Image: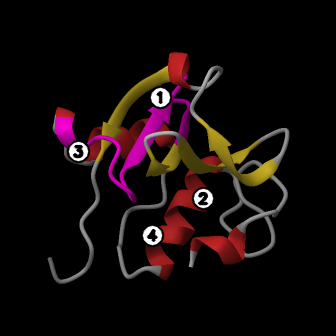
Amino acid sequence: MIERHMGRPYVWGACGLKSFDCSGFVWRVMLDNGIFIKRTTARKLYMSLPRVGEGGRWDYGNLVFFDNLKHVGIVNERSSFYHAQSSKGTNLSSFDPYWRGKIAGFRGVKAAGR
């Protein structure tokens, strides 16, 4: 489901289907996968979701927050994450070297029915 939203332009406040901001992208991908979260800012989303234990941070589908909770993405694996980047739109980015230093924390989401 996430792949169908790749390559879309970044537009502040947008939640798809043709453009996204970072939290709108996360909201849309979760919605498409039956996971219902509130459409809100990255900071408020961080505050509303449960922490992820040290061992599970890099699990696929967890949310990763950056830059003092101003940006959010979806973990793909230990080395990459999906997000809507203002300069590139929706894409798969590497954590290293630029993004890893900006990580503020991780949060988990639960699928519907779990």
Label disc, if present, on residue 86 of the rendered structure: none
Residue topped by disc 3: 56
User: Is disc 1 placed on a helix, strand or loop?
Assistant: loop
Q: CA distance from mark 1 to mark 4?
A: 19 Å
If the image is split into quadrants, where does the N terminus sit? bottom right
**Which mark is first along the chain, 3 or 4?**
4
| Quarter holding residue 107 | top left
Residue topped by disc 1: 69
Residue 92 location (% of width, % of height): 67, 51
Q: Look at 16% across and 38% down and name the residue there.
A: 53
Please state the extent of the stretch shown in magenta in the rendering: 55-72
Q: Residues within 10 Å of mark 1 (few under 14, many from 20)?
A: some
The relative height of residue 46 versus residue 19 in the rendered view (above or below) is above
Residue 93 location (% of width, % of height): 66, 43
User: Is disc 4 placed on a helix, strand or loop?
Assistant: helix
User: Which amino acid type is shown beneath numbered disc 3?
Assistant: Gly
User: Which amino acid type is shown beneath numbered disc 4?
Assistant: Met
Q: Residues within 10 Å of mark 3 (few under 14, many from 20)?
A: few
Residue 97 location (% of width, % of height): 63, 20
Are the residues at dot 2 and dot 4 in contact (C-beta closer than 8 Å)?
no
**Which mark is first along the chain, 2 or 3?**
2
Q: CA distance from mark 1 to mark 3?
A: 20 Å
| Quarter holding residue 14 | bottom right
Label disc, if present, on residue 24 of the rendered structure: 2
**Which mark is first along the chain, 4 or 1?**
4
Residue topped by disc 4: 30
Q: CA distance from mark 4 to mark 3?
A: 18 Å
